[in-house]
C-alpha cells in the first residue's frame, strides 16, 4: 500500500521511500521556457523591453492595439519614428526588437506584417540618405594608439587609475566588448613568457576564443604590464578580473558592462578626447591592426569575428580606403 501527501504531491509507499509524482505538461513547459530564457543576455532583454515600451507609447497615443501588430500599423510606426527624427539604426532596432519581443510573448508577426516592415525600413533608409547632414551620433570612433597613450597618461596612480589603465589596454588588445571584460575572471588570464593568454569564455555571440597578448613596445601602453600592475595593486588572485571601485577607493565584488562603459567614457574625457564609448576599443584594435598591415584572418581571430564579418571589414575599410586608394600613383 501507499499513501499520497496531497499538498506536496509526493507518493509515500509503505516502505517509506518517497516517489516524486510525474511532472505535468504545463509545469514542463514553464520549466522549458524559464531555461531557454537564459539564451538571451540581460542587455538584450533590456533592449527588447525598451523597444516594447516605445511601441506601447505609440499605441497609447494612436489608439492602436498593443499585441496585434498588423501590416498597416507597422508601416505607420516606421513613418512615425522617421518623422520624430530617429536615426536609421534606431528605427531598425526598434522594429527588430519589437518583432523579437512579440515573438517571445507569443504574438509573432505574420508573414505579411514582416514583409511590410522590411519595405517600410527600405523607404526610411532612402529618405534619410537624401537628407542633408546626419541623424544620431554615427559610428563609435575607434581608439588609435596615440589616443590610448593619452588615456594611459591621464590615469592617476590610484587604485582606480591602475584599474582603468589595465581595463582599457587589455580591452583594446583582445578587441573586447564591454560584457566580455565584465565577465572576465582572473583565472582566464594566464601569464606566459611572451605575454598573456586570455580565455574569453563568455561572448555575446556565444563563442569562446583565446587571444594572445604580447608585451607592448612602450611601457605606458603595454597591456601585459598594466594587467600585472592591476593584479598587484588590487591583490587579486581569483574571481572577477575587473571590479567596481567606490568613491572612497574601496574595491567592489564585480563590475557591470555599464560600469566598464562608464570607466572608458570618463577616462577618454579626462584625456581630452571628448565623448567616446567603450566600443571604440574593439573597433580600434581592428583598424590599428589593419594599419599595421595585419590580414583579416589574424584580426578576426583576435577579436572573435568571422573572417568575413561585415562589422570587422567595415572597421578595416576605413584604413584600406586610404592605404589602397586607386588614385595613388596614377599621376594626378
Image (spheres, rainbow, N blue to C red):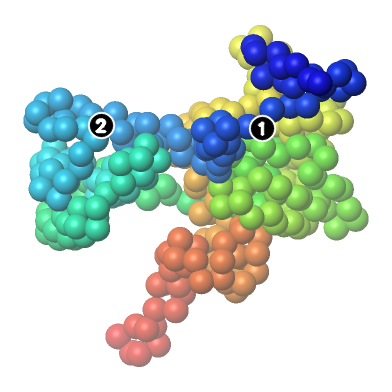
User: Which residue is label 1 attached to?
Assistant: 22
Q: Residue at x 60, y 65 (%)?
A: 300
Residue 105 drawn above or below residue 248 = below
First in sequence: mark 1 vs mark 2: 1
Q: Which residue is drawn at the image coordinates 74% and 34% (left, top)?
A: 241
Badge 1, how many Cα within 10 Å: few under 14, some, many 20+? few
Rendered location of residue 267, percent (x, y): 54, 32
Q: In the drawing, does residue 219 fall left or right of residue 300?
A: right
Could you give the CA–CA distance between mark 1 and mark 2, rounded to whole angstroms? 42 Å
Q: Residue at x 12, y 33 (%)?
A: 64
Q: Nearer the viewer, mark 1 or mark 2?
A: 1
Dot 2 lies on which element?
A: helix
As drawn, is 172 to the left or to the right of 240?
Answer: left
Outermost residue toward the bottom in this view:
330
Residue 54: assigned label:
2
Q: Position of residue 102 (x, y in %)?
A: 33, 40
Comparing 322 with 137, the one in front is 137
Look at the numbered disc 1 and give the secondary structure of its residue: loop
**The N terminus - image quarter:** top right
- Residue 270 seen by the camera: no
Residue 157: percent from left, percent from top: 71, 25
Residue at 27% x, 49% y is 109
> Residue 63, can we see it?
yes
Question: Is 42 left or right of 210, judged from the image as shown?
Answer: left
In front of the other: 155 or 103 = 103
- Answer few, some or many: residues within 10 Å of disc 2's Cα (few below 14, many 20 plus, some between 14 and 19): few
Quarter of the image where the C terminus is located: bottom left
The location of residue 324, given as percent across then percent down, is 44, 79
Amino acid at each position: 500500500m501507499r499513501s499520497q501527501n496531497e499538498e506536496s504531491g509526493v507518493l509515500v509507499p509503505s516502505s517509506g521511500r518517497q516517489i516524486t509524482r510525474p511532472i505535468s505538461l504545463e509545469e514542463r513547459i514553464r520549466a522549458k521556457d524559464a531555461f531557454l530564457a537564459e539564451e538571451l543576455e540581460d542587455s538584450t532583454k533590456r533592449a527588447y523591453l525598451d523597444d516594447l515600451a516605445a511601441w506601447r507609447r505609440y499605441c497609447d497615443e494612436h489608439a492602436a492595439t498593443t499585441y496585434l501588430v498588423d501590416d498597416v500599423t507597422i508601416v505607420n510606426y516606421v513613418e512615425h519614428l522617421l518623422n520624430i527624427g530617429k536615426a536609421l539604426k534606431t528605427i531598425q532596432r526598434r522594429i527588430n526588437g519589437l518583432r523579437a519581443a512579440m515573438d517571445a510573448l507569443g504574438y509573432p508577426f505574420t508573414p505579411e506584417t514582416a514583409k511590410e516592415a522590411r519595405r517600410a525600413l527600405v523607404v526610411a533608409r532612402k529618405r534619410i540618405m537624401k537628407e542633408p547632414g546626419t541623424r544620431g551620433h554615427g559610428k563609435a570612433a575607434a581608439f588609435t594608439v596615440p589616443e590610448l597613450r593619452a588615456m594611459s597618461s591621464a590615469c592617476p596612480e590610484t587604485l582606480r587609475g591602475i584599474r582603468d589603465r589595465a581595463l582599457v589596454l587589455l580591452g583594446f588588445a583582445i578587441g573586447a566588448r564591454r560584457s566580455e571584460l565584465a565577465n572576465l575572471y582572473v583565472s582566464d588570464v594566464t601569464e606566459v613568457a611572451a605575454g598573456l593568454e586570455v580565455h574569453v569564455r563568455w561572448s555575446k555571440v556565444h563563442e569562446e576564443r583565446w587571444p594572445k597578448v604580447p608585451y607592448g613596445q612602450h611601457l605606458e601602453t603595454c597591456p601585459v604590464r598594466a594587467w600585472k600592475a592591476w593584479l598587484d595593486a588590487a591583490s587579486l588572485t581569483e574571481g572577477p578580473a575587473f571590479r567596481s571601485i567606490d568613491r572612497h577607493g574601496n574595491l567592489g565584488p564585480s563590475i557591470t558592462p555599464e560600469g566598464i562603459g562608464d570607466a572608458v567614457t570618463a577616462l577618454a574625457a579626462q584625456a581630452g578626447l571628448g565623448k567616446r564609448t567603450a566600443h571604440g576599443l574593439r573597433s580600434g584594435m581592428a583598424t590599428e591592426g589593419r594599419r599595421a598591415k595585419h590580414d583579416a584572418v589574424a584580426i578576426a581571430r583576435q577579436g572573435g569575428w568571422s573572417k568575413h564579418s561585415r562589422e570587422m571589414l567595415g572597421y578595416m575599410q576605413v584604413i584600406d580606403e586610404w592605404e589602397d586608394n586607386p588614385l595613388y600613383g596614377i599621376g594626378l
